[in-house]
């Protein structure tokens, strides 16, 4: 016997990027937005009457779901909101993958294997190809599929005709295709167009990156009413009120301020592409990003030392120890000024093959 359950003992928790105490660092390690959220967010939060906090929030976050539906051109009953897209993903794993065999790329968002372990999912990884693109045919294993698109930490986007092939394969096998679109706002495409034809496709999104609200914890899913109903069954078996009143008001204000989002996303994309071009011109391997980060080969063998040197220069980036990733650094895109600093440092510190 032990105090802990067998479940608690076998968990292998997710390891998030560091949140440093030293605020002077240029923080480019967790893909946060360098700009503040829309000014309308603070206004909306201030307008939440203090007295209303006595009362439980709307469990379905109806106004927020309606705003998300409007901006994305879908029906409101196709939207589900959760406490960050991490929670939405957890509910999706429980609702659609528990007890089944799930196929996912070997290099992808590292929370998927953690949820698989928690929810009793047989998690089968399919190696990315040598150029870090997704092996679409390899993912077709007769069951559900999880795909981050654009992928993390590569930043590469899989074209929609290929995503559709996965949707078709999953549907033919009565299974769900999960498309994690955490970075969709920075990408040239989205799978939303597939929803009309595929009731088995679930798309997840987050306010953490494109809407600069990582601190509020707001995520959502878009999919057929049947899939949304299954997510609600899981939610109501765990925590019926995942989003508090402040988060619901903040999210609604943020998503409806489409001009502000477009403007800040544009600034991030410009800084990203300028850094990409400079690294490429200098012969430093870097992947074409459809996200708010760049994946840079900083050392032909192991980039841990370059990460440390960057830190000593006041810049925090993410390094992954996995064999296939250890030569690379994931650099979140900051302001144009941040990126000038980082580009200069990378040109100086990266070791070429
Ligand atoms: C950041 C990220 C998430 C989590 O987003 P939250 O809403 O902050 O929980 C999910 N998936 C991917 C691929 C991400 O990069």
Image (tube, rainbow, N blue to C red):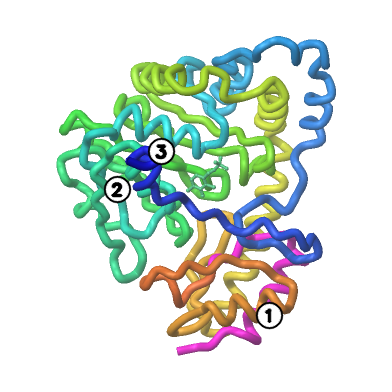
Q: Would residue 284 be found to the left or right of residue 265 on screen? A: left
Say above or below: 103 vs 41.
Answer: below
The dot on residue 345 is: 1
Magenta region: 330-353
Of labels 3 and 2, earlier in sequence is 2
Mark 1 residue crowding within 10 angstroms, few (<14) / some (14–19) / many (20+):
some
Say above or below: 332 vs 161.
Answer: below
Query: Residue 238 at x, y = what percent?
Result: 46, 23
| Callout 2: SS | helix
Instruction: State the residue at coordinates (43%, 84%).
Output: 301
| Callout 1: SS | helix
- Residue indicated by mark 3: 191
> Does mark 2 have its CB less than 8 Å from ligand 1?
no
- Residue indicated by mark 2: 162
Quadrant of image for the N terminus:
top left
Instruction: Judge whether residue 54 can be spotted in this image.
Output: yes
Q: Nearer the viewer, mark 1 or mark 3?
A: 1
- Between the C-alphas of marks 1 and 3, the distance is 36 Å
- Between the C-alphas of marks 2 and 1, the distance is 37 Å
Q: Would residue 291 be found to the left or right of residue 8 on screen? A: right
Instruction: State the residue at coordinates (62%, 59%).
Output: 18
| Callout 3: SS | helix
- Whether the residues at callouts 2 and 1 have beta carbons within 8 Å, the answer is no
- Between the C-alphas of marks 3 and 2, the distance is 11 Å
The residue nearer to you, when weighing 45 against 311, is: 311
The residue nearer to you, when weighing 101 against 180, is: 101
The stretch drawn in magenta includes residue 342 = yes
- Whether the residues at callouts 1 and 3 have beta carbons within 8 Å, the answer is no
Mark 2 residue crowding within 10 angstroms, few (<14) / some (14–19) / many (20+):
some
Instruction: State the residue at coordinates (41%, 39%).
Output: 3
Query: Residue 171 at x, y = what percent?
Result: 22, 31
């Amino acid at each position: 016997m032990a105090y802990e359950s067998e479940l608690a003992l076998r968990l292998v928790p997710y390891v998030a990027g560091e949140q440093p105490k030293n605020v002077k660092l240029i923080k480019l390690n967790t893909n946060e937005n360098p700009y503040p959220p829309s000014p309308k967010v603070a206004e909306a939060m201030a307008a939440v009457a203090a007295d209303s906090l006595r009362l439980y929030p709307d469990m379905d976050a109806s106004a927020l779901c309606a705003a998300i539906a409007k901006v994305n051109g879908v029906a409101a009953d196709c939207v589900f909101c959760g406490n960050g897209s991490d929670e939405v993903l957890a509910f999706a794993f429980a609702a659609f993958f528990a007890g089944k065999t799930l196929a996912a790329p070997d290099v992808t968002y590292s929370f998927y294997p953690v949820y698989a372990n928690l929810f009793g999912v047989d998690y089968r990884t399919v190696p990315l190809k040598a150029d870090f693109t997704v092996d679409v045919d390899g993912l077709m294993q007769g069951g559900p599929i999880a795909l981050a698109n654009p992928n993390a930490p590569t930043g590469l986007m899989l074209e929609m005709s290929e995503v559709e092939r996965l949707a078709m394969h999953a549907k033919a096998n009565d299974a769900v295709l999960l498309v994690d679109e955490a970075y969709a706002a920075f990408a040239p495409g989205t799978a939303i167009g597939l929803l009309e034809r595929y009731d088995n496709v679930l798309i997840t999104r987050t306010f953490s990156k494109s809407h600069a609200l990582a601190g509020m914890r707001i995520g959502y899913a878009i999919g057929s009413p049947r899939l949304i109903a299954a997510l609600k069954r899981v939610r109501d078996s765990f925590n019926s009120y995942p989003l508090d009143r402040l988060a619901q008001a903040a999210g609604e204000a943020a998503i409806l301020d489409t001009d502000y989002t477009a403007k800040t996303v544009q600034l991030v994309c410009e800084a990203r592409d300028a850094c990409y071009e400079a690294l490429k011109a200098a012969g430093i391997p870097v992947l074409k990003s459809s996200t708010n980060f760049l994946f840079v080969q900083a050392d032909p063998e192991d980039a841990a030392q370059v990460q440390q040197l960057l830190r000593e220069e006041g810049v925090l980036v993410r390094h992954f120890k996995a064999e296939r990733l250890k030569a690379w650094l994931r650099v979140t895109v900051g302001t144009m000024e941040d990126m000038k600093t980082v580009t200069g440092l990378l040109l100086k510190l990266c070791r070429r093959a």
